[in-house]
């Protein structure tokens, strides 16, 4: 089964809101390539110091990426006869490791015009006769799907066919491929591609009529059932197709209901359903016959303990394995026997593990769960778990070794305004008692019910090695605690998320982890809503903020239904056009609406000219109003001892809402952000850089 976290995130992050604003007259600072076209700072000494820092960080980041270039990757696809590995836009296949053979090229994105595409996902046909892969060009939303034959592979191999605008796809058989067609940021059509001896036949199988829903094709772990998953912000609806009869009409599992979220798997001729039908809308595992899959036939098998967030579920041959997040943040595996659901085993994952990613393996190996564990500062490590023995092994067959010693992982809680305890994950090298003078970078997201990303990042590892502490705030609005974590409703949840974030930062200060002048905060996309609101309400908690592709004018966006994403975003933000309560609620936290003359932390805002999720005009509008408020406050001259507030708009070309895909551009962007935080927090220059004046 595809990870429920990945399924939900793919259905939601593609639709972070548009901004409906007109271009403002803002002196935007545009930086081609490595960013030194114009000044960050008006003071020449400050600008020279900033430039030196950016170059220093860029060199260190390049070295950090090189150090971790050989970490395990989930981009390996295991077939019945070969392993498939992607490297630099080329997919190779090779025989099992025991055999001596040279990797054989089976697909090259260079076959396509342009050749700058990157591989997104790969699927093998059941008999390993065909391979399909989606590839995506930089600055584009839509991907193309390349289909190649795996029989009689030659050096002059060319695609069998290329499909445009494909989002998800799965093989039903060696000659039948199901895929969804993407138009802009929407995905609402499912097609069946039949490869026959006489040619190619394309048939529309399903079309989703509701613009709030996004459709994705999935495939059960045993390969017997394909699923058409329609997902909105608050409910799901699944249809199934048997691989043995792909020309039959899709069968509806359970009609959509407001608030009902469920996912399906298949084994032993039964559907296994993960649904939020437990007490308090918590997830639970249920079973139903494939012939009668509706909710009336659902039989409860197992429910995780209340408050434990369900991150993933994998159905193996005889067991269902859950990846759970304990309320204190630890990750735990829990296996449930399909023969006897009362037989449950627990296995704690390493204390340092913050991110879990299951790996798709061959259908012939359904007894072992393969996965990667990582943290923001610890690279992915490959593990395998056997439910039969309840043992955790490395994928080299060795038992779990000693945990990493370079970093402390401290789990904290902060009491929010309403008494709710909000989890914090703190990563640091020095003991907690010695962190008073350390700079702290706080991370937050808190939207769409999605978890805050805690996967490995060479950038975060570099900061840790430079003495920084990294704090991850698991606020309401995100998915860290499962569905039971956000039962307030989407509207009230946003203000609660702001209160949670403020409580987390205050908790760090109270513990002596850092001081406001040594605290920076980072967020991207919808996470900027909470950060912008916090800066309006409690700016004294921070000194510096970095925002990437930020969503900052919620009210104006949600008042324009003509925008492609506004309608489907109502489940997340509300509808201010029909509900005065929704309008007042949005207006209470909207970052743009609540800017006021006061002292703000310095901000570096990175935006992309072609971003179709967050058009740059809205970011410019926010920056113009914020600069005006800062200037008004400064002109009063009341608080002369306050540090100067910098509001910098780093305007980049392209439409990479999730950051530049090109390695060099990514290095430059990260270096700019690190140099900015270094400057604004008043840190000493790096020893190897020498003493910087100014």
Image: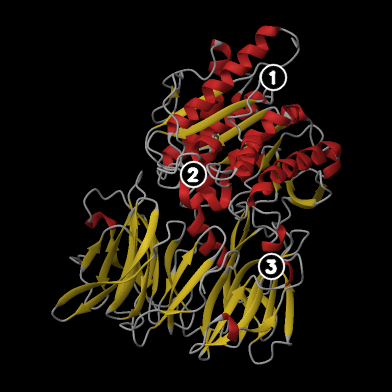
Left or right position of 433 against 548? right
Instruction: State the separation of the CA atoms marked 3 and 2.
Output: 27 Å
Left or right position of 28 against 4? left
Residue 26 spot, x, y in % from top left? 46, 19
Along the polypeptide, which appears first: circle 3 or circle 2? 2
Please tell me which residue lies in front, 67 or 510. 510
Please tell me which residue lies in front, 599 or 212. 212
The residue where tag 3 is placed is: 281
Q: Nearer the viewer, mark 3 or mark 1?
A: 3
The image shows residue 358, relative to residue 612, as above or below, that is below
Residue 509 is at least partly visible in this image = yes
Q: Quadrant of residue 186?
A: bottom left
Instruction: State the separation of the CA atoms marked 3 and 1.
Output: 42 Å
Residue 59 is at least partly visible in this image = no
Q: Which mark is residue 598?
A: 1
Residue 533 spot, x, y in % from top left? 66, 34
The image shows residue 440, relative to residue 493, as above or below, that is above
Instruction: State the separation of the CA atoms marked 1 and 2.
Output: 28 Å
Q: How many marks?
A: 3
Residue at 34% across, 87% down: 245
- Using a 10 Å C-alpha cutoff, classify the residue at mark 2 as few (fewer than 14 neighbours), some (14 to 19) or many (20 or more): many
Residue at 82% across, 36% down: 509
Q: Quadrant of residue 522?
A: top right
The residue where tag 2 is placed is: 17
Residue 248 spot, x, y in % from top left? 33, 84
Q: SS for tag 2?
A: loop
Please tell me which residue lies in front, 424 or 130. 424
- Using a 10 Å C-alpha cutoff, classify the residue at mark 3 as few (fewer than 14 neighbours), some (14 to 19) or many (20 or more): some
């Amino acid at each position: 089964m595809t990870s429920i976290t990945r399924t939900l995130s793919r259905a939601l992050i593609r639709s972070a809101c548009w901004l409906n604003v007109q271009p403002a007259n803002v002196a935007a600072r545009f930086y081609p390539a490595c960013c030194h076209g114009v000044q960050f700072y008006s003071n020449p000494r400050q600008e020279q110091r900033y430039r030196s820092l950016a170059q220093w960080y860029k060199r260190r980041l390049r070295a950090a990426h090189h150090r971790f270039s050989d970490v395990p990757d989930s981009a390996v696809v295991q077939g019945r006869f070969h392993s498939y590995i992607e490297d630099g836009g080329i997919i190779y296949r090779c025989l099992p490791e025991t055999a001596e053979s040279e990797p054989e090229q089976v697909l090259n994105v260079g076959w396509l015009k342009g050749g700058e595409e990157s591989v997104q996902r790969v699927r093998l046909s059941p008999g390993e006769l065909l391979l399909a892969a989606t590839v995506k060009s930089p600055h584009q939303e839509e991907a193309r799907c390349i289909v190649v034959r795996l029989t009689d592979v030659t050096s002059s191999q060319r695609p069998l066919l290329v499909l445009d605008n494909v989002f998800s796809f799965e093989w039903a058989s060696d000659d039948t491929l199901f895929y969804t067609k993407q138009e802009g940021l929407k995905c609402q059509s499912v097609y069946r591609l039949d490869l026959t001896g006489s040619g190619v036949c394309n048939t529309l199988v399903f079309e989703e009529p509701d613009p709030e829903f996004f459709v994705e094709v999935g495939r059960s772990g045993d390969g017997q059932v394909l699923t058409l998953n329609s997902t909105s912000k608050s409910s799901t609806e699944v249809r199934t197709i048997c691989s043995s009869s792909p020309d039959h009409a899709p069968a509806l599992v359970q009609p959509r209901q407001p608030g009902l979220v469920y996912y399906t798997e298949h084994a032993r001729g039964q559907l296994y359903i993960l649904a939020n039908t437990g007490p308090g809308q918590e997830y639970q595992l249920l079973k139903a016959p494939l012939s009668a899959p509706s909710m009336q036939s659902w039989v409860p098998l197992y429910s995780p303990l209340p408050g434990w967030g369900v991150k993933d579920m994998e159905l193996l041959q005889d067991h269902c394995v859950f990846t759970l997040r304990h309320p204190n943040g630890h990750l735990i595996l829990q296996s449930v026997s399909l023969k006897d659901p009362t037989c449950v085993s627990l296995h704690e994952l390493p204390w340092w593990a913050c991110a879990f990613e299951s790996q798709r393996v061959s259908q012939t190996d359904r007894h072992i769960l393969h996965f990667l564990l990582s943290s923001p500062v610890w690279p992915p490590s490959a593990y395998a778990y056997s439910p039969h023995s309840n043992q955790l092994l490395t994928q080299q067959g060795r038992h779990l070794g000693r945990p990493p010693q370079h970093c402390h992982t401290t789990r904290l809680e902060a009491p929010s305004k309403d008494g709710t305890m909000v989890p914090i994950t703190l990563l640091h090298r020095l003991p907690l008692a010695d962190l008073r003078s350390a700079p702290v970078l706080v991370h937050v997201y808190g939207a769409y019910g999605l978890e805050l990303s805690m996967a490995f990042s060479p950038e975060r590892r570099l900061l840790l090695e430079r003495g920084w502490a990294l704090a991850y705030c698991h606020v309401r609005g995100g998915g860290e605690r499962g569905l039971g974590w956000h039962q307030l409703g989407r509207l009230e949840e946003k203000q609660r998320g702001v209160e949670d974030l403020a409580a987390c930062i205050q908790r760090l200060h109270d513990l002596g982890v850092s001081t406001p002048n040594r605290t920076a905060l980072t967020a991207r996309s919808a996470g900027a809503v909470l950060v912008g609101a916090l800066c309006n309400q409690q700016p004294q908690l921070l000194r510096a903020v970095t925002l990437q592709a930020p969503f900052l004018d919620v009210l104006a966006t949600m008042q324009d239904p003509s925008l492609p994403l506004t309608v489907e975003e109502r489940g997340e933000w509300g509808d201010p056009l029909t509900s005065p309560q929704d309008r007042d609620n949005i207006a209470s936290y909207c970052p743009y609406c609540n800017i006021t003359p006061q002292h703000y932390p310095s901000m570096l805002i990175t935006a992309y000219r072609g971003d179709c999720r967050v058009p740059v005009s809205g970011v410019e509008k926010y920056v113009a109003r914020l600069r005006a408020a800062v200037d008004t406050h400064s002109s009063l001259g009341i608080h002369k001892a306050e540090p100067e507030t910098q509001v910098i708009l780093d305007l980049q070309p392209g439409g990479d809402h999730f950051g530049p895909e090109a390695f060099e551009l990514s290095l430059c962007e990260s270096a700019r952000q690190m140099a900015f935080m270094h400057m604004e927090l008043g840190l000493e220059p790096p020893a190897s850089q020498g003493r910087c004046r100014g």
